[in-house]
Image (cartoon, grey):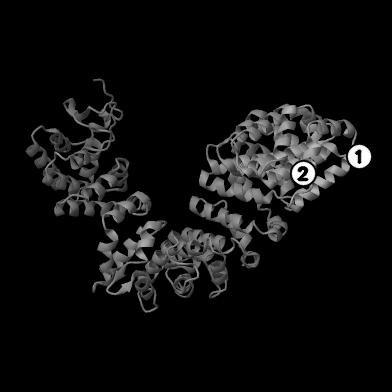
Amino acid sequence: MACVLEAPLRMSVLSEVTASSRHYVDRLFDLDPQKVLQGVIDMKNAVIGNNKQKANLIVLGAVPSLKVSTKKEFFCWKSSGIVKWEGLMNGGNWLLYLLQQETSSTELRTECAVVLGSLAMGTENNVKSLLDCHIIPALLQGLLSPDLKFIEACLRCLRTIFISPVTPEDLLYTGPDHQTILFNHGAVQNIAHLLISTSYKVRMQALKCFSVLAFENPQVSMTLVNVSVDGELLPQIFVKMLQRDKPIEMQLTSAKCLTSMCRAGAIRTDDSCIVLKTLPCLVRMCSKERLLEERVEGAETLAYLIETDVELQRIASITDHLIVMLADYFKYPSSVSAITDIKRLDHDLKHAHELRQAAFKLYASLGANDEDIRKKIIETENMMDRIVNGLSESSIKVRLAAVRCLHSLSRSVQQLRTSFQDHAVWKPLMKVLQNAPNEILVVASSTLCNLLLEFSPSKEPILESGAIELLCSLTQSENLALRVNGIWALMNMAFQAEQKIKSDILRGLSTEQLFQLLSDSDVNVLMKTLGLLRNLLSTRPHIDHIMSTHGKQIMQAVTLILEGEHNIEVKEQTLCILANIADGTTAKELIMTNDDILQKIKYYMSHSNAKLQLAAMFCISNLIWNEEEGSQERQDKLRDMGIVDILHKLSQSSDPNLCDKAKTALQQYLA
């Protein structure tokens, strides 16, 4: 069977590798299991303390990235050529392959784990190679083995990999799948009793495990809140660990546990353990007296705790002058000339961007809802300048946090009219939108939606900077949030806009893209697109102009939506668009000459939902208004359709809005 080796080793590289290194790798492929085992043991002895040998073995194929085109056989590299092996090989490295095979002896699997751990102790490139081969899932699977020596070898290897700075922290525990695996295997019950161990190290490791197990995991959090250890519930134990006389590490980690449980809904936000214990503890961690890394962790955890709760935001904002305290986060590193200690300078530089990121995050949470809090934040020393600078930082994480902070503050009508205009924040924001990862684009485009509201002074310069083209391109994104934000911003832009702007929007979107958005599977995209159409079709001259150029397509779209399986809100918005069209001078004829649309309006006048009835009646009222030219002919046609009979019935409705609207419409026939 044909098979492709996608990443063959280059002979130019092989020629630089010693023959002894090649010898170790070759022995991995021997058909005699005992020789393979001895080969792995010899390899283990050869790589201890020898980074060059580790690198050689990785280059030679102990850790190649090989992929093949069949599930029934694979090929391996040997110095003498290519040898076929029977089995399943989807990629990864040979040591990992041997480690995962049930046919491998426990001793062989253990030795493989030991060698992999040794390789991980080499350079960061070694760790990257192992991660690329998906070593983490393989080692986690090894923890299910009944053999304790093999488990220990896997754990040691995992520890080595995770203390490397190149390993993403979210690969372990914080992923829902890993949390579930640990939960299902009794992790909560087996770890809980360790919280009362006489050993501080044991207590801390148990606490850390709970903090990551509970993170964004309602299942674990709901279980933790009811677990009892030595007669005490876990939340009570965590609160005791928050006390000021406990080590800072313990206070912080306990606060993280309680924060995760609160965010998961296992503990109420107004519970005393949150309001009187957890929140004050986290604010303490933000003070100048704490180490920089503690201040970072404290601020980020507090930002997460209060992110969605208005009352917690209010309490935090008035606790220990937190808003002013956070301003100090931007003062690192200190002046170079004032620092004679090189180690301190290096430390400050290392944590400076983390501090700014944490401060922006916490400011974003604090200002998410309350206008007074936003005002205090913006009045903080050089705050707007710091946000503007943050938007152009080299660190993606700092840029994202700065955009989130700006987005939070942009919800303030007052600040949009003052501080945002004074500092022209739209300029750096538009620059961010030109070239950024999706996670930043989502928040930045959401912020732009606020800056395009009709009362924002930034709206006009944003329009002049080419925003329409940018936003139209966002509506074509595969990312749902970007599509929503793109069409939302265009909707805000079109509100009470000049005819030229509306025409530019329609030209930028194109009819094809408009139909694509109207057929989007996501209701938010559909609703915002309908909102855009409604704003475009406002004021009579604009309605008549747009319908003269796009009337056929718009009427087709309206028909499709009214016939489709959509919710009440979507159909109500669509009927409101028809009501706007009916308000046009010439545009209303597109309705009057479309019997299908007229029948649909009639149908919705008698619908069981009052919102749809009311929206349909707005259409009728605009069509029969007797002060407009041709009103008599329109009234007669609608009377012949039975519309007047329906109006009489609705004038007796128990719903006051329907009753009043029906009576007003009937008066047009009597005038």
Q: Earlier in the sequence, mark 1 or mark 2?
A: 1
Residue 628 location in percent, x, y? Answer: 89, 37
- The residue indicated by pointer 2 is 649
Residue 72 location in percent, x, y? Answer: 22, 27
Q: Is residue 536 above or below residue 591?
A: below
Q: Which mark is residue 615?
A: none
Q: Residues within 10 Å of mark 1 (few under 14, many from 20)?
A: few
Q: Of all residues shown, which one is farthest toward the top? A: 1
- As shown in the figure, which amino acid type bears the numbered disc 1? Glu
- The quarter of the image holding the C terminus is top right
Whether residue 537 appears in this view of the structure is: no
Q: Residues within 10 Å of mark 2 (few under 14, many from 20)?
A: few
Residue beneath the point at 70% across and 58% down: 413
Q: Is residue 375 above or below residue 115?
A: below
- As shown in the figure, which amino acid type bears the numbered disc 2? Lys
- The residue indicated by pointer 1 is 627
How far apart, in angstroms, are the residues tagged by discs 1 and 2?
25 Å
Is 135 left or right of 550, judged from the image as shown? left
Residue 281 location in percent, x, y? Answer: 45, 73
Residue beneath the point at 15% across and 33% down: 29
Element under label 2? helix
Q: Is residue 550 above or below residue 315?
A: above
Residue beneath the point at 34% across and 73% down: 237
Instruction: Please give the count of numbered marks on the rendered protein.
Output: 2
Q: Nearer the viewer, residue 75 or 176?
A: 176
